[in-house]
Image: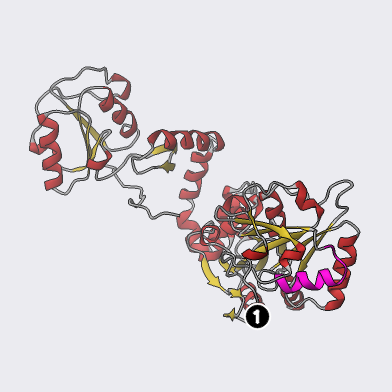
Amino acid sequence: MGDLNTFPVSYKVKGRRIVIIGGGEEALNKARLVSKTTASVVIISQHVSVDFSEVGIVPEERQFHRDDLSGSVMVFIAEESNEAEAAAREARRLGIPVNVVDKPEQCDFYVPSIVERAPLTVAVSSEGDAPVLARLVRAQIEAMLSPDLGRLARLAGSLRERIAGQLSKVQARRFYEALVTGDRRPVDELVDAHAGDAAGIVWLIGAGPGSPDLLTLRAQRLLQAADVIVHDQLVPAAVIEMGRRDAERLSVGKKKGHHSFTQAQINGILVRLAREGKRVARLKSGDPMVFGRVGEELDALRKAAVPYEIVPGVSAALAAAADTATPVTRRKVSTGVIFATAHGAEDSELEHWAALAGSGMTLALYMGKSVAGETAGKLVRLGMSPTLPVGIVVNAGRPERSLFRTGLGDLATAAIAMPDGPAIIFIGESVHHGDWADAVTLAETTFKVA
């Protein structure tokens, strides 16, 4: 995610003046927008060429004077003239922000595409780089939002003083969330329902393999409702930032060789936060039920009688299969798929994998990059064919993913030099049926000799 060159705000203009310099179509376009506000709008130009009656403003067909900027909060320059240049210079001298139509490099502020459900507004801005794209996005949002949202926003505003006096900050936030998300109970009943002690809960959420658009809709909704987001090392910042802006973020990241928190400490944190009445989003990479150590956290939550909910996510192996169009199960090729982790695998487990793979199953190894060669060698010695195709996806589901292909025998020769990131290793005939055209083919000379 790139850095913003502008900071989006809602600027109060009630009772102030907005000045538009121009008398043509561009001035009319700006007048259509700002006339929806409660500001006093003044249009000045020596050459008025369009009819402004639709916006209820009579343009002043005259020269610009310095006094025209008295009490102004913003100025739009919508024509090219000496008058316009003088107005822009004077506004900047007075510290009044200026927008020069169609010249983003000369603008102090940009006008976003706006979805208006007064007093609720949604603004979409591209910092002047892509106004057409901003308008298209605005149109999509417009179609999503009910016309009744303005009425709901006004109701919420009318209750602010009452709710602040009767409910705590946490209770008030949950009251408003219930109000705006469709709870149709009478207001008094809704207030009473949120006046008791806030109940805590832990949501064990699968964050997917890393790409924000692979997050489920349920996960997005719960992230917006969470008071605290407890996340792992592999969950990218873009996913974490999908949570509510004022939610507390707590990294309990664990990666190979670096554990900032023990599992017992993480369990204790989840229980403590829930007992404090917090709604906790426990973000885990991939799917929480697949190599996410969720079992230990569930045991702790059950023992403490803490409510919880599990939200599935796209597991890395499934993302890797999608990245490469590899059908991990296919009629007459692979009757099933085995999800396994190569780290700490005992010989008895390897024997079991080899037997299953020998019967036509696809083997999907998680977290196996550093022990790939050693594991492959053991599998060959246990009877798996050295010619079995192997496909490796590093950073599955992300734009920076890397693909590699080889045979099981070559994989057994030594460790592979690969990019940093989690890897999924597919072993089985199903790899032949995937799309590995962009993969780097690893031969024996590609490996670092152990």
Q: Locate residue 378: give its quadrant.
A: bottom right
**Position in image of residue 336 (x %, y %):** 86, 55
Residue at position x 42%, y 42% in the image: 124
For this rendering, which residue is in front, 119 or 4?
Answer: 4
| Figure quadrant of residue 312 | bottom right
> Coloured how?
secondary structure
Q: Residue at x 25, y 27 (%)?
A: 27
In the image, residue 367 lies at what x, y percent?
Answer: 68, 69
Image position of 369 with respect to 300: above or below: above
In the image, taking residue 127 as reference, residue 135 lies left or right, namely: right
In which quadrant of the rendered image does the C terminus lie?
Answer: bottom right
Q: For the N terminus, which image quadrant?
A: bottom left
Q: Is residue 63 above or below residue 450?
A: above
**Residue in the picture at 55% in, 55% down:** 400
Q: Nearer the viewer, residue 267 or 317?
A: 317
Residue 363 is at least partly visible in this image: yes
Reply above or below: 50 against 327.
above
Work out whether residue 241 or residue 225 is closer to the camera in this orientation and state it: 241
Q: Which residue is mark 1?
A: 268
Q: Position of residue 219 (x, y in %)?
A: 64, 56
Considering the whole magenta stretch, tell me its main secondary structure. helix
Q: Which residues are magenta?
A: 372-385
- Secondary structure category for the residue under label 1: helix
Left or right of residue 273, residue 57 in this image: left
**Image-quadrant location for residue 29:** top left
Q: Say if residue 284 shows up in the picture.
A: no
- Crowd class of label 1 (few under 14; some 14 to 19; many from 20; radius 10 Å): some
Q: Residue furthest front?
A: 445
Q: Is residue 8 magenta?
A: no
> Total label count?
1
Q: Amino acid at mark 1?
A: Gly
**Towards the viewer: 321 or 63:** 321
